[in-house]
Image (tube, helix red, strand yellow):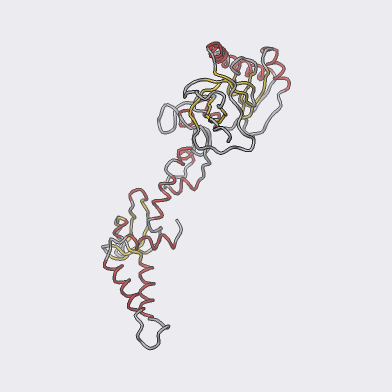
Amino acid sequence: MASERFIVGIRFQKAGKIYHFDSSAIPDLKVGEYVLVETTRGKQLGQMIQKVENYQRPPEGWKPLERRANAQDLILKHHYQQKELEATINCRAKASEMNIVGVKFVASEFSYDGSRLSILYSNEAGEKMEFRNLRKAMQRLYPNAQVDFHLIGPRDVAKILGGMGACGLENRCCSAFLTEFSPVSIKMAKEQGISLTPTEITGMCGRLRCCLVYEYEQYTEARKQLPKRGKRVITPQGEGKVIDVLPLKESVIVELPSGAQAEFMKHELQPAEELEALQKKAEKGCDKHPDGNCTCGRKGASKVEQLSENSNDDDATNIDSSDTPA
């Protein structure tokens, strides 16, 4: 029987993506401790964030942790972190001398021991670029490090630069706690009734705001329990047409025949079209029992009476929801 694996989540940057590694060689590793691992960017120093209980083995398997980080490793990491801003400034200066335009050099990252220097850049086209001369110039400035350039997207740029969010919080969501970016669409803003004005739904990165995802599922589920706009409903004040939906309040705005508008809660509504369909079915009777002894029509009538008498019956509202997808 194979021994149980000890899979842990490792993070290399603040609020960065969590990567899974095999810690079977260090089973007593605790949350918060630092370890050394081999990555695509060379040997890196990361922090254990979590133990993964229910895991599925990826096709390529997990890379093992090399060892715990010692005091010297942590001192080296801190030393080279202090030099990252300097490397970014030097790179921008060299790029300016070489007349490289249309590129934003965002940040620099040293590996924990300074053996590798990764320079992160972005451009409007989102295309990778070759910086041969710039790489040579940076290599001369940092001869002990292997210099690489990595293209990042606008959301990653905003995450690295940080700053105040449009909502007024001191740190943007991406810089504070988001470890990965979820897909965001215009549909999410429409579902929540948010204005589609670009300034209202666009973040500092120029893309749709990540926060549009947060309440989308709640709005979607709430709308499933309510009639859609344009539907005819029966209210305590008579029949009317739904002109607006307030999902989180579980209510709708109904226009009455008099032209007045009123708000009604979900339990106060009955679907007019479904009631009419049941009424017609009851009046038609049953053609399966020509001898006249059938009670199908009466059963249908009973259902209509029940729906009409019980205005608090949620099933009446759910009939509309099940027939018409939200």
Whether residue 291 sits left or right of residue 208 in the image: it is left
Q: Using the image, determine if residue 5 lies above or below residue 37.
A: below
Q: Name which residue lies at 49% across and 20% down.
A: 33
Q: Which is more toward the observer, 299 or 227?
A: 299
Q: Residue furthest front?
A: 1
Q: Quadrant of residue 3?
A: top right
Residue 257: % across, % down: 31, 65
Q: Name which residue lies at 68% across and 31% down.
A: 128
Q: Name which residue lies at 63% across and 34% down.
A: 126
Q: Which is more toward the observer, 25 or 298?
A: 25
Q: Using the image, determine if residue 40 lies above or below residue 184.
A: above
Name the image quarter holding the C terminus: bottom left
Residue 289: % across, % down: 40, 84
Residue 278: % across, % down: 37, 72
Name the image quarter holding the N terminus: top right
Q: Using the image, determine if residue 52 lies above or below residue 189.
A: above
- The number of numbered badges drawn on the structure is 0
Q: Which is more toward the observer, 146 or 112?
A: 112
Q: Quadrant of residue 89?
A: top right
Residue 296: % across, % down: 36, 78
Whether residue 182 sits left or right of residue 261 in the image: it is right
Whether residue 15 sits left or right of residue 238 in the image: it is right
Q: Name which residue lies at 72% across and 17% down.
A: 136
Q: Residue furthest bottom?
A: 291
